[in-house]
Image (cartoon, rainbow, N blue to C red):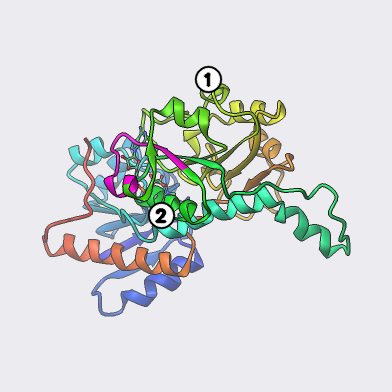
Amino acid sequence: MRIAFFSAKSYDRDSFDLFLKGSGHEIMYFEAKLDKHTVYLAEGYSAVCAFVNDQIDATILKKLDQLKIKLIALRCAGYNQIDLETAASLGICVVRVPAYSPEAVAEHAFALILTLSRKTHKAYNRVRENNFSLEGLTGINIHGKTIGVIGTGAIGKAFCRIAKGFGCKILAFDIAESEEMKELGVHYLPLDEVLSRSHIISLHCPLTPETRHLINSKTISKMIDGVALINTSRGALVDTKAVIRALKNHKIGYLGIDVYEQEEHIFFKNLLEEIMQDEQIARLMTFPNVLVTGHQAFLTKEALEQIAKITLTNITAFERGEKLINEIKAS
Ligand code: NAD
């Protein structure tokens, strides 16, 4: 198939080119994000390959339909960015990569926890200026703490296994409990109890109408004073304004985020020469106890290779009319 590949980065090309040879497919890499200005680039192609911040709403889908696009291959797990009902009504098939390396994301969540709890982000800068003072670097042990995990799917499970190794007590909330996690020692509780009993809360559920702003003023008020909040899932799980208020009044002890509500305007771009227009992210980055990474939790060599392999397999299966194990449909 001829594939129009949007939001292409050098690391995408490297991993897809590795598996493209012999696949019979042809890819045109477009650096541009898919939106109303760039959708016309898909003319002459039969499939679109898109990522987390590509715009795939009803307007774009109708344009893609006019351009005779029959397949949208998402090269990510989350699919909140696509209007599945409109895609179905237009007969456009949507596939995704449900799991590529859950460990990559879970390990990144732990990287955020460890950095913030031991202040290595501060230490890194300090010693580079020959300042070896330890003043202000007192950390907090992870061992013995209670970790609350919201969503124990592929990534949540990998996260729980790491937490277990650290000697944490693990509480979890999920609409579908896992027997495997119970055997590991994870205790499932109602959401409010998980929030009110955890020293560290890590979000691993998808963004849905039910989970949007799951973390808000009301839910934050139930948390332990000085709670640590980690979000590597989707930005809009968190009401950023409420989190900023909670950081200002010390309710939240530290915040590690790899995703952000308005990230589509900022992430995956080098804005070095620009004036930051987003007041909330600018405010977040003024806090010494906040660590922001730009949606890089998935970004490991192993994960990228799996993403490329599975995406191309999905496209081949579609072309051959085979059963699509990774198809997503409106529920
Ligand atoms: P998954 O589908 O395997 O697991 C999601 C879990 O959340 C499931 O167990 C499901 O039952 C649970 N869930 C659904 N609705 C819920 C609710 N209302 N409350 C509590 N739990 C609920 O997905 P996954 O592979 O573990 O990925 C989780 C999320 O991580 C994705 O949806 C995606 O948004 C995000 N993600 C981020 C990155 C990154 O680079 N930062 C990479 C991959 C995935």
Give amino acid for label 2.
Ala
Image height check: is 194 above or below 123?
above
In which quarter of the view is residue 100 placed?
bottom left
Kindly identify which residue carries mark 1. Answer: 218
Q: Which mark is residue 241?
A: none
- From the image, which quarter does the N terminus lie in? bottom left
Kindly identify which residue carries mark 2. Answer: 158
Q: Which circle's residue, 2 or 1, is located before the other in the chain?
A: 2
Task: Select label 2 or label 1 by which is in front.
Answer: 2
Q: x and y percent of residue 256 in the render?
A: 60, 44
**Which region shows up in magenta?**
170-182
Which class describes the residues within 10 Å of circle 1: few (<14), some (14-19), or many (20+)?
Answer: few
Q: CA distance from mark 2 to mark 1?
A: 29 Å
Q: Is residue 184 left or right of residue 32?
A: left
Q: x and y percent of residue 32 in the render?
A: 47, 55
Q: x and y percent of residue 182 in the render?
A: 33, 44
Dot 2: element: helix
What residue appears at the point 25 percent right and 36 percent down from the top-left corner? 86
